[in-house]
Amino acid sequence: MNADLRNLISLQDIDQKIASLKKHISEVPDKVRTLHEELVRLIQAHQARVGLNQDLAKQRRARESDVDMMRTKLSRLKDQLMTVKTNREYTVMLHEIESGEEQIRVAEDGILDVMEQMEAMEGDLADSDRALAIRKEELDREIKNAENAAPLMESEVARLGQVKTDLEAIIGADLLGRYHRIADARKGIALAEAKNELCSACHVRIRPQVYAELLRTDEIHVCDSCSRILFLREGDKA
Ligand SMILES: [Zn+2]
């Protein structure tokens, strides 16, 4: 194979690696931000559940102290019941006692209701606690990995940049210029493998005469359709 062409193939390979690394590097901040956002969302959702559970506990304590007060009031009323003088007073007080007892029953039902809600939440909370711990560890690791990967990729880009410079120094200036012009115009891909008489980049058939010359000679040919420089794999050569 034409030595320049062989070097160009290596150059394109390096250019693609550099482009891919740069793309990955540029995606790191977004990736880290997305991971952070997920973590914050999970923590907030968990805190909301914990908060709800605390609210229920507070409600329960408040209702229990209401019941205590009602009981105290009720027992005072019962004591007074013994000391009333008239039937009318007795009836009024008895009615008050009955309605107090009814209030206590309602309040106690309310407490049971709150306790049932808390009980139902207990399992959820434990699950959510465990799930959060697991996912947090994963996310922390993913964030760390993403952040650590960036400098490694940067130094690989620098290394490949040096290899690229060395390679460009030994490729003929005209051909190198052509390579860069085509690469700029064709999304970074200036070379296309000629395979089964087709240009592998644009999939257009290569003229038989051009294909025959590719097989026989070391001359540089371009695809009629996409203008990329064509090359054959060594094994495909006659
Ligand atoms: Zn083509």
Image (tube, rainbow, N blue to C red):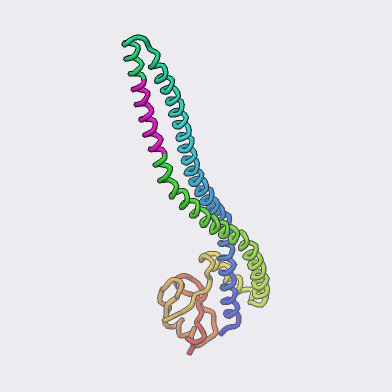
Counting from the top left corner in percent of width and height, residue 194 is at 46, 79
Check the image and report above or below for 193 versus 217.
above
Q: Is residue 193 magenta?
A: no
Image position of 22 with respect to 75: above or below: below
Residue at left 58%, top 65%? 21
Which residues fall within the magenta stretch? Answer: 97-114
Foreground residue, 48 or 74? 74
Count of marks placed on residues: 0
Is 129 left or right of 176, judged from the image as shown? Answer: left
| x then y, percent, for residue 113 | 38, 38
Q: From the viewer's side, name the closer residue of 11 and 92.
A: 92
Q: Position of residue 77 (x, y in %)?
A: 41, 19
The single residue placed furthest to the bottom in the displayed view is: 238
154, above or below 173, in the image: above
In the displayed structure, 17 sits above or below 83; it is below
Q: Confirm whether the magenta stretch covers residue 98.
A: yes
Which image quarter is the N terminus in?
Answer: bottom right
Could you tell me which residue is drawn at 36 percent across and 21 percent down?
97
**Residue at image x 42%, y 77%?**
198
Q: Which quadrant would residue 64 be assigned to in this image?
A: top left
Residue 189 placement (x, y as % from top left): 52, 69
126 or 100, which lies in front? 100
Q: Residue at x 45, y 28 (%)?
A: 66
Q: Identify the main secondary structure in magenta.
A: helix
Query: Is 93 left or right of 141, judged from the image as shown?
Result: left
